């Protein structure tokens, strides 16, 4: 700074109004570098006297300012570098006077709002290269929230280099680690060296984590932090031989655990996953953790390979037909809220369905031996269909794992599929239930062509549509089998303000599209005629092919229309509303599952999920755009699907001559009169001029071409049980809704704290929680985040998660136990702290429970540079 600028600044300072009660102004001009000592004669300031300190005139100066001249303004020039307060005769005057510096360091400090104390001055000089750029000074200034000591200064410099907005050591260390463990390419660490902040950084890591090496590296630091954190939830005996990477200090363990919890729950999960994968491979941790008992492993989450070790043990057992249901359920419950669950989610989903299938098998260990068809039908529509759902959900998870899987688990998952899932579903459930069902219904099928005492598909229109005053919408989804419809029903009940009922009826035989679609149309009589080498179905003499269905509907009720979902899906609102205006009966044909089978059999299960979403979309359109409140969802038939390739024992030869056959499907046979195929059940056909047959259980008829995993047309429950979902939307003004709002208003289930004590005496502790209501028609699943805060709302713990999705009526089965880890802070046993239970969506007001924290040993804030 040149002298003219100095004089200008000093004139400005002396011209400012005096503080209250002051009669004059004294400014101490510090110039330890003596830059202006030889130019003092050129300094002239109006009404200001210059006093130059020499080091031997301090007493004389003190006497002058305190006694001889108490009225004049003074500029006291102090070039002395000795800052010892004991030898400073003028300290009392300095304390009530003002200071001025004209050196570059002082200018920077003033620019950045730093107090002019010697310790900070020395640090600004130390970091002179860093502060040499205005952009870096601006970044530092943004972080200056009242820096008063060396530790804060070091942290602010490092934070500015890192580009983070906090002085928290966690943020700085996270920035360094995220830039890579290669020291030569780690830009942040290289900048620390460039700007002389590397020494401060390694001091910080030593005090926070306990990591200290003469040749410290980022890789060594990461290993140390991860393994030290692991000791908080895993016995150190399982980490024997890795002692050099672990701090035994409680304060370091708490800090590392807190740091890792924050690291693995952040947004850059994939980045962190890859880093941890590198470390666990380098330290051969997977082989080590495979030897740890499952009970000791399920509570720890630092390394991704822990989930792989857990799943490996469980899946090996399942592959050997050892299924510990409680262990699987409890393990999945514990793991699903932890950091790396989503990376192996499909495997956990799969073994959860294995547990469900095994539980079902144990409940029906005696097999299926009913003698009444209606009893089997009732059992299937109320309970047995769950097994179909478990199988479908398993294969949804399995298919997803094939495209988004894990190299360490894939083969084991395939073994679970082949050795357990296919055996229990195909060779136990389908075979035993199918054998019982085929035997019981054989006489009825032979005599009547259907099962007596069960509602029939052919009666759908007469019983539900004809003569009704209400405007009715019917959604017919091809191959939308009963268990998929049950999933739709549950979702509609929990997601919409409605009454939803699921019933069923028996499909026509054969259970294929052209017969089922015809049966759902209005008619007095269905008949057939041979056409192009096959059979055409007629309703009162009219073809029931897709292009003729609108005409058949209008023939019964002129205010009817048949639409295709594919057509109306892409239409504008006004266009599709015009199509249904004035209509009493609207049929909407939907085809997702059966259509998917034409591409690949293994797509039918995922198509079921898509079908549910699309049908819910149709219902929303009907409700919001068409004003409809009465909606039926049904199907033409169901289907059988088994994933494993069929063997010859799964197939049967039709044994009929080719010229006898009219139509041959995998699950049905229609012939000219007089055929007598072996090993097939006789089914009375709708036309006495023909004979019809079906294989037992889930057996397929041998046939060239076409796949045999996805089939329909036969007499299995999965094919014959056609769902009928009756959906009644309740407007707010409706009497039904007004009469019982509580029943129809859907609300998320709530959780509450049940642990009695409100005093915390350990840094790591657990609390018990309770889901108040089971998930049901009007109580939906909710996710809750739980954490502790101080009186100012600052988080002081890690975050636990509860997935409140329990459906059991038994309250004991709706409990949760969550572990918490307090941050490395000092806690006041007289202050109030709060547990927050927050809905993850943010739609509900958070619950708060007051706690006291009384910890005999608690970690104070680190002074990293003392």
Image (tube, rainbow, N blue to C red):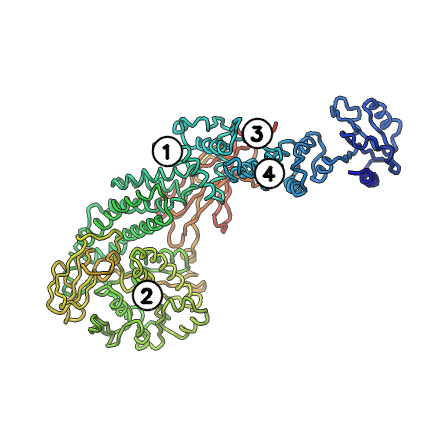
- Counting labels gives 4
Tell which tag, 2 or 1, sits nearer the viewer.
Answer: 1
The residue where tag 4 is placed is 159
N-terminal label among 1 and 4: 4
Q: Indicate the secondary structure of the residue bearing disc 1.
A: helix
N-terminal label among 4 and 2: 4
The N terminus, quarter of image: top right
The residue where tag 2 is placed is 476
**Label 3 vs label 4: CA separation?**
15 Å
Q: Residue shown at 39%/66% (left/top)?
A: 629
**Label 1 vs label 4: CA separation?**
36 Å
N-terminal label among 2 and 1: 1
Crowding near the residue tagged with mark 2, few <14, some 14–19, many ≥20 C-alpha atoms within 10 Å:
many
Question: Nearest the camera: 235 or 850?
Answer: 235
N-terminal label among 1 and 3: 3
**Label 2 vs label 3: CA separation?**
71 Å
**Label 4 vs label 2: CA separation?**
62 Å
The residue where tag 3 is placed is 203
Crowding near the residue tagged with mark 3, few <14, some 14–19, many ≥20 C-alpha atoms within 10 Å:
some
The residue where tag 1 is placed is 289
Crowding near the residue tagged with mark 1, few <14, some 14–19, many ≥20 C-alpha atoms within 10 Å:
many
Tell which tag, 4 or 2, sits nearer the viewer.
Answer: 4
Q: Position of residue 94 (x, y in %)?
A: 78, 30
């Amino acid at each position: 700074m040149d002298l003219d600028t100095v004089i200008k600044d000093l004139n400005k300072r002396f011209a400012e109004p005096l503080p209250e009660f002051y009669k004059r102004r004294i400014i101490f001009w510090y110039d330890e570098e003596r830059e202006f000592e030889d130019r003092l004669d050129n300094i002239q300031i109006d009404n200001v006297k210059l006093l130059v300190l020499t080091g031997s005139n301090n007493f004389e100066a003190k006497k002058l300012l305190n006694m001889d001249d108490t009225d004049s303004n003074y500029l006291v020039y102090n070039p002395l570098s000795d800052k010892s307060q004991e030898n400073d005769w003028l300290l009392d005057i300095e304390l009530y006077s003002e200071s001025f510096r004209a050196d570059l360091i002082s200018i920077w400090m003033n620019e950045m709002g730093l107090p002019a104390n010697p310790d900070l001055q020395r640090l600004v000089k130390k970091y002179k290269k860093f502060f040499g750029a205005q952009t870096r000074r601006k970044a530092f200034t943004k972080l200056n929230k009242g820096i008063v000591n060396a530790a804060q200064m070091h942290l602010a410099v490092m934070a500015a280099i890192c580009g983070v907005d906090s002085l928290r050591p966690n943020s700085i260390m996270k920035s360094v680690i995220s830039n890579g463990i290669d020291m030569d390419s780690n830009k942040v660490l290289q900048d620390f060296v460039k700007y002389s902040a590397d020494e401060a950084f390694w001091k910080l890591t030593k005090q926070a984590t306990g990591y200290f090496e003469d040749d410290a590296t980022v890789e060594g630091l990461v290993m140390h932090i991860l393994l030290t954190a692991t000791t908080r939830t895993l016995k150190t005996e399982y980490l024997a031989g890795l002692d050099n990477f672990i701090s035994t200090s409680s304060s370091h363990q708490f800090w590392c655990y807190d740091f890792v919890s924050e690291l693995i729950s952040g947004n850059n999960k994939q980045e962190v996953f890859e880093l941890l994968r590198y470390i666990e491979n380098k330290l051969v941790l997977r082989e080590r953790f495979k030897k740890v008992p499952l009970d000791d492993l399920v509570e720890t989450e630092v390394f991704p390979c822990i989930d792989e070790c857990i799943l490996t043990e469980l899946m090996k057992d399942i592959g050997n037909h050892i299924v510990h249901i409680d262990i699987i359920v409890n393990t999945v419950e514990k793991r699903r809220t932890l950091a790396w669950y989503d990376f192996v989610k499909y495997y956990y989903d799969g073994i959860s369905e294995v547990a469900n299938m095994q539980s079902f098998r144990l409940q029906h260990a005696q097999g299926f031996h009913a003698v009444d068809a209606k009893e089997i039908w009732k059992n299937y529509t109320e309970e047995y269909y769950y097994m179909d759902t478990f199988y479908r959900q398993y294969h949804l998870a399995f298919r997803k794992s094939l495209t988004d899987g894990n190299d360490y688990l894939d083969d084991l998952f395939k073994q679970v599929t082949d050795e357990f899932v296919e055996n229990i579903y195909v060779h136990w459930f389908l075979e035993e239930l199918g054998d019982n069902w085929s035997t019981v219904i054989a006489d009825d099928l032979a005599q009547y062509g259907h099962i007596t005492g069960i509602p029939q598909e052919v009666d759908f229109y007469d019983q539900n549509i004809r003569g009704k005053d209400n405007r009715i919408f019917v959604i017919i989804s091809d191959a939308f089998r009963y268990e998929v419809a049950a999933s739709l029903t549950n979702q509609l009940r929990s997601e919409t303000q409605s009454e939803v009922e699921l019933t069923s009826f028996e499909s026509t035989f054969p259970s294929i599209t052209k017969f089922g679609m015809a049966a759902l149309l209005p008619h007095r009589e269905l008949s057939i005629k041979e056409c192009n080498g096959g059979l055409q179905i007629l309703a009162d003499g009219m073809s029931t092919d897709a292009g003729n269905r609108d005409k058949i509907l209008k023939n019964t009720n002129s205010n009817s229309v048949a639409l295709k979902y594919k057509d109306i899906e892409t239409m504008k609102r006004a266009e599709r509303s015009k199509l249904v205006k004035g209509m009493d009966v609207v049929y909407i044909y939907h085809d997702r599952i059966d259509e998917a089978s034409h591409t690949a059999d293994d797509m039918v299960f995922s198509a079921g999920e898509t079908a549910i979403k699309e049908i819910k979309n149709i219902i929303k359109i009907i409700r919001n755009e068409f004003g409809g409140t009465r909606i039926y969802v049904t199907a033409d038939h169901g289907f059988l699907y088994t994933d494993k390739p069929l063997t010859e024992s799964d197939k049967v030869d039709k044994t009929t001559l080719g010229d006898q056959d009219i139509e041959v499907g995998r699950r049905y046979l229609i012939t000219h009169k007089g055929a007598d195929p072996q090993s097939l059940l006789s089914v009375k056909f709708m036309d006495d001029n023909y004979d019809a047959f079906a294989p037992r259980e889930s057996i397929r008829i041998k046939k060239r071409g076409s796949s045999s995993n996805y089939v329909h047309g036969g007499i299995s429950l999965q094919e014959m049980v056609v769902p009928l979902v009756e959906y009644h939307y309740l407007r707010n003004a409706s009497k039904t809704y007004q009469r019982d709002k509580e029943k129809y208003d859907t609300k998320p289930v709530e959780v509450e704290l049940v642990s009695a004590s409100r005093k915390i005496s350990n840094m790591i502790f657990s609390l018990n929680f309770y889901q108040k209501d089971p998930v049901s028609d009007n109580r939906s699943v909710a996710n809750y985040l739980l954490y502790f805060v101080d009186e100012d709302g600052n988080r002081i713990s890690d975050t636990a998660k509860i997935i409140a999705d329990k459906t059991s009526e038994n309250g004991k089965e709706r409990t949760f136990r969550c572990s918490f880890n307090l941050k490395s802070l000092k806690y006041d046993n007289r202050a109030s702290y709060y547990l927050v239970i927050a809905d993850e969506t943010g739609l509900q007001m958070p619950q708060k429970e007051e706690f006291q924290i009384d910890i005999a040993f608690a970690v104070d804030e680190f002074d990293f540079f003392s």
